[in-house]
Image (tube, grey):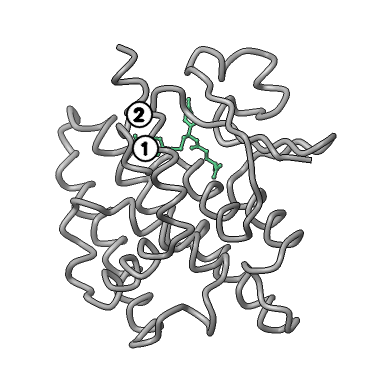
Amino acid sequence: MTPVITAFEDSPDRGEGQARDMRVRWALEEVGQPYDVRLVSFEEMKQPAHRALHPFGQIPTYQEGDLALFESGAIILHIAGRHVGLLPDDPNARARAIAWMFAALNTVEPPIVECEAAMILESDKSWHEERLAMLEERIRVRLGQLSTRLGDADWLDGAFSAGDLLMVTVLRRLDGWDMLEKFPNLSAYVARGEARPAYKRAFADQLAVFTGRLLAD
Ligand code: GTB
């Protein structure tokens, strides 16, 4: 059964691969699982048919037979559990890789998302600059801690895993922020992720949605 994922019909990032379908595409490419993509508009995402798949009216979703999933982390954990290539076989190493998945989503991504939201939604507030500086500092602290742990290793815990896949996509959100560059080992880590053939295929496929739309307009 070929899984079907959803992605933005018209991604606000203009093909930069920042929307969360990118991480699901990458996971599917890593394990060699073909998939179909159903593109949805912002309007469609809020309709009952899509909300039946995703209670919060967002992308990505994942459908495979009678299984419907939402939340990129849950989708990737499912893919990694069904296929070889994203989680180690050794039970302890597997548990540690899953811990890194949670760390990416629960510890590293939240201050970045909070900071993005502040930039978009709070720029007119009198306290904006002060709050932004505080949020940026929170990100820097996390990056420092992550950088120390990674050291000169290629990946977070032995071989590349779903933990690295998620962490790389989370760190990519800082593209153009002049923050990651202060941690050369993290910049190199992201570049290693982006150099993986599976990443490149996933990136090209999501970019094709944007370029296809440009040509159609
Ligand atoms: N926790 C959920 C998950 O991990 O799957 C979060 C899902 C989510 O935030 N989805 C976003 C969405 O559907 C798209 S990825 N938003 C529409 C809505 O809420 O109405 C977030 C995103 C969007 C755009 C950019 N960008 O343009 O750079 C980056 C990230």
Looking at the rendering, which quadrant does residue 154 occupy?
bottom left
Mark 2, other Cα within 10 Å: few <14 / some 14–19 / many ≥20? many
Residue 71 or residue 159, whichever sits in front: 159
Left or right for 172, reference 103: left
What residue is drawn where x is 54% and y is 80%? 159
Residue 55 or residue 138, whichever sits in front: 55
Tag 1: residue type? Leu
Left or right for 12, reference 20: left
Looking at the rendering, which quadrant does residue 10 occupy?
top left
How far is disc 2 from disc 1 in space, using C-alphas? 5 Å
Whether residues under marks 2 and 1 lie with C-beta atoms below 8 angstroms apart, the answer is: yes
Vertical comparison of 94 with 181: above or below: below
Task: Determine whether the beta carbon of the residue marked 1 sits less than 8 angstroms from the nearest atom of ligand 1.
Answer: no
Q: Position of residue 35 (x, y in %)?
A: 63, 41
What residue is drawn where x is 81% and y is 38%? 67
Residue 207 is labelled as 1
Q: From the image, which quarter does the N terminus lie in?
A: top right
Q: Position of residue 118 (x, y in %)?
A: 28, 39
Task: Determine whether the beta carbon of the residue marked 2 sits less than 8 angstroms from the nearest atom of ligand 1.
Answer: no
Residue 210 is labelled as 2
Tag 2: residue type? Phe
Left or right for 208, reference 130: right
What residue is drawn where x is 56% and y is 14%? 44
Most distant residue in the bottom direction? 152
